[in-house]
DNA sequence: CTGAAAGCGCTTACAG
DNA sequence: CTGAAAGCGCTTACAG
């Protein structure tokens, strides 16, 4: 059996609650002598507070759920981006004395169940659709949605400036003389991350006479990129600049273009989004829109912890984005004489 | 306030413990009528059992710790391999009604603290050094170390056949006529994953007259690979076949070789280890030693759950490995006439 | 500065 | 088939 508060109390000759006070640093009203005696015994006996008992009594679990959608029976697949977010959150929370419960969510109702079951003090929602977050009922604890444009006031959000990301990607291409631009990303609706990137992309193109923006819906996988890249010049003969909403997709497109006989960036330039390490491993190195993940995570953790400590729910936070210029964009090729 | 067992009991007009029995499926000694009445109320009220209370009373948390070493103040960095393992474990445990506590471990003693604090039913150790696992004291719960060669009987292990991996990598190179072979991986001691791979590698080389194996210690990062690749032909003029103990490293070496004016695989062939997606994204596609991660995870989860349910600790399990042949190995170049 | 008591929401023998 | 009681290890007012 593990050593309990009671064991320490008996050995120290004080009450259980005095030990509790010492252990929890509520040292204001305890004599120095008692504090030291208790502390010594705690260390000597290797006392560790039982989290379940503590949660139950205090109705505060010091536990945050990191919730990730997952298909029933499927395994939690985390993108490099999710992994970085989880890693960063875990660190911040650990340092603040919190713990992380990692859980795959099969259907939205499980969010509430997880909160109730564990008495979570808060939860981070990673990779949920805006519509799912919109539909979330109140659960009585702070919810923080990463990369969501949901308007649900019960979940605060942290995200990057997706509009700006699309904008600078297009501007970079336009500055290099490209006029036939292509936006490649997953199908999108009236809102969401991809929609914002697209809006920014289109806004930049609209500023430049003669420039045109086409859009193609494609899953963000390497394979889909490969396929698109191979067919790109026949499907979009006027396109010389491509913006892909994810680095894996961009890398696939580059490989496909080369398979199809085009050079990157001489014939077609490509810009990605995410700034994964992967972009450094391929040739040409990928020019991509980078977000400051570390800062995003830090802000997210701070917001969540703040709300738990009773601060007002902050407004949505949108973090800046920048272009990581590498080698996959060059000047637009001189167009062959028409006609 | 969330609804409790007591609420349900009152509404159903039965005792708390009858509700508890129904909720927990200990339905043997409860009348069908009662079962149904209680169940309906449970559903209607949206009852969810409080995990803390349950753990405390039953001294069974249904929670497994996934413990990953991390430098103090640092963030949890998880390799693609770790991510896949965590994802797989989470799925298996979720389906078995267990939960996953993800926690960075700054020093070995924290393993025991985590177990005590949470009343963990077991823990998965991911990425620990053999020496750290060797030193782990008994914690009273099953511990499962992934990819460890520790002999500590308190932690059972699951790993891949690293010796075999090194062996088939070398054999593949030898079969293609390579005689000057290089093993590139992190520095290793008398045991551990890298040591085994090296032993297998050397064993294969020893079978072939004239074949020689050199070894170079290098961190398994892209950048270190790049550096090694660039200098490879001057540092190891006789080497035409390289085995890198990680795919990122192999990819870096390939890029470095090209930077240094060598073609892959025409001048130098390269074999990796891990079978990451990355190997498919580069050209030439990386030939690599592949482990069956899904199977490894499934076995790991099954072993841990079995032990928790009182089965004897199984012996260490070693999973087979195979070569994923792609494009980074070719026939050894004809050696230039020696002067 | 210190403690006795109640209670958090469950489960576990035990008794009927 | 059903329940009353004790207890898991803590914390929270409250009283002194």
Image (tube, coloured by chain):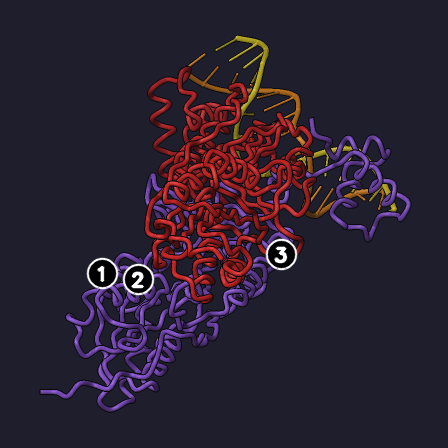
Chain colours: A purple, B red, C yellow, D orange
Question: At 33% across and 80% down in the image, what residue appears?
Answer: A170
Give the quarter of the image for residue A81.
bottom left
Locate residue B3 relative to residue A31 in the image: left or right.
Answer: left
Residue B335 versus residue B246: which sits nearer the camera? B335
| Residue depth check, mark 1 versus mark 3: number of the one nearer the observer | 1
Mark 1 vs mark 2: which is more N-terminal?
A: 1
Disc 3 designates what residue?
A: B74
| Inter-mark Cα distance, 1 to 2 | 8 Å
Crowdedness near tag 1: few (<14), some (14–19) or many (≥20) residues, C-alpha within 10 Å: some
Task: Give the left or right position of residue B83, taking residue B35 as reference.
Answer: right
Q: Compute the Cα span from label 1 to label 3.
A: 40 Å
Disc 2 crowd, CA 10 A, few/some/many (<14, 14-19, 20+): many
Q: Quadrant of residue B48?
A: top left
Which numbered circle lies on residue A227? 1
The location of residue B319, given as percent across then percent down, is 44, 31
Labelled pair 1, 2 in contact (Cβ < 8 Å)? yes
Label 3 sits on a secondary structure element that is loop
């Amino acid at each position: 059996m593990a050593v309990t508060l009671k064991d320490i109390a008996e050995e120290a000759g004080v009450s259980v609650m005095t030990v509790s006070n010492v252990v929890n640093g509520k040292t204001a009203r305890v004599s120095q002598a008692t504090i030291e005696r208790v502390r010594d015994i705690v260390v000597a006996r290797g006392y560790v507070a039982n989290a379940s008992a503590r949660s139950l009594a205090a109705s505060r679990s010091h536990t945050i759920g990191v919730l990730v959608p997952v298909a029933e029976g499927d395994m939690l697949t985390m993108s490099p981006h999710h992994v970085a977010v989880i890693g960063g959150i875990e660190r911040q929370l650990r340092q603040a004395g919190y713990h992380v419960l990692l859980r795959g969510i099969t259907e939205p109702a499980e969010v509430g169940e997880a909160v109730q079951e564990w008495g979570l003090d808060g939860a981070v929602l990673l990779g949920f659709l805006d519509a799912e977050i919109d539909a979330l009922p109140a659960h009585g604890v702070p919810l923080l949605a990463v990369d969501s444009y949901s308007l649900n006031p019960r979940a605060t959000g942290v995200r990057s400036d997706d509009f700006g990301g699309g904008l600078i990607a297009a501007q970079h291409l336009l500055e290099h003389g490209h006029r036939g631009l292509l936006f490649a990303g997953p199908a999108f609706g009236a809102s969401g991350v991809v929609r914002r990137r697209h809006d920014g992309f289109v806004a930049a193109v609209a500023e430049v006479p003669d420039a045109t923006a086409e859009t193609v819906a494609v899953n963000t996988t390497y394979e889909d990129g490969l396929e698109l890249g191979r067919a790109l010049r026949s499907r979009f003969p006027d396109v010389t600049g491509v913006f892909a909403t994810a680095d894996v997709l961009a890398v696939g497109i580059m490989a496909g273009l080369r398979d199809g006989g085009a050079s990157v960036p001489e014939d077609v330039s490509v810009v990605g989004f995410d700034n994964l390490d992967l972009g450094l491993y391929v040739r040409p190195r990928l020019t991509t829109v980078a977000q400051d993940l570390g800062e995003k995570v830090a802000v997210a953790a701070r917001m969540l912890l703040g709300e738990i400590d009773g601060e007002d729910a902050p407004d949505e936070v949108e973090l800046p984005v920048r272009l990581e210029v590498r080698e996959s964009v060059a000047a637009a090729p001189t167009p062959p004489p028409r006609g």
